[in-house]
Amino acid sequence: MKQFYDLQGELVKFSTQFNQFSFPPRDVLVLTKWDEDWLFTKHKERGVEFPGGKIESGETTEEAARREVYEETGAILSRLMPIAEYQVGQGDRPFVKRVFFGEVERLEKRSLI
């Protein structure tokens, strides 16, 4: 396990092994490959980033990853592999996020509301 501090001074613990933390992941992050490029989304506050978000009740991490990629980019994934987990913070409000690598099969046109 690797440890470092992020730009906000929070302790980050990073592992390529799963379920190494005291609670399960509540969020997902998907490093999304589209042909020879990366597929990003644009968050109104954080700017350009990889797709990801919260795991909903009753969802697996894989289901959440596929849903978040689709909701944020319109992409359908052909392949999805878990690659790591990390925990940010200690004490009252730490969170664990599972990181995936995903390959885009196709982009579906979506109308934005």
Image: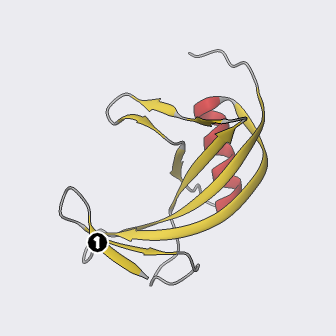
Q: Which residue is mark 1?
A: 4
Residue 32 image point, x, y percent: 63, 44
As helix, strand or loop, the secondary structure at mark 1 comes to: strand
Q: Closer to the camera, 94 or 83?
A: 83
The image position of residue 29, as x and y in percent, is 53, 53
Is 68 left or right of 53, judged from the image as shown?
right
Q: Which residue shows up at 50% across the image and 63% down it? A: 26
Identity of the residue drawn at 51% across and 84% down: 20
Question: How many numbered discs sit on the rendered protein?
Answer: 1
Asked if residue 100 is positioned above or below residue 105 in the image, the reply reads below
Q: Locate the N terminus and report the quarter of the image it occupies.
A: bottom left
In front of the other: 56 or 36: 36
Q: Is residue 93 left or right of residue 16?
A: left
Residue 60, compared with residue 74, is above or below; it is below
Give residue 88's position: percent from left, percent from top: 34, 67
Image: 95 above or below 21: above
- Report crowding for label 1: few under 14, some 14 to 19, many 20 or more residues within 10 A (C-alpha): few
Name the residue located 58 percent from the left edge and 33 percent from the top edge. Answer: 72
Q: Amino acid at mark 1?
A: Phe
Work out which residue is located at the far front of the displayed protein and give it.
Answer: 36
Q: Is residue 37 left or right of residue 85?
A: right
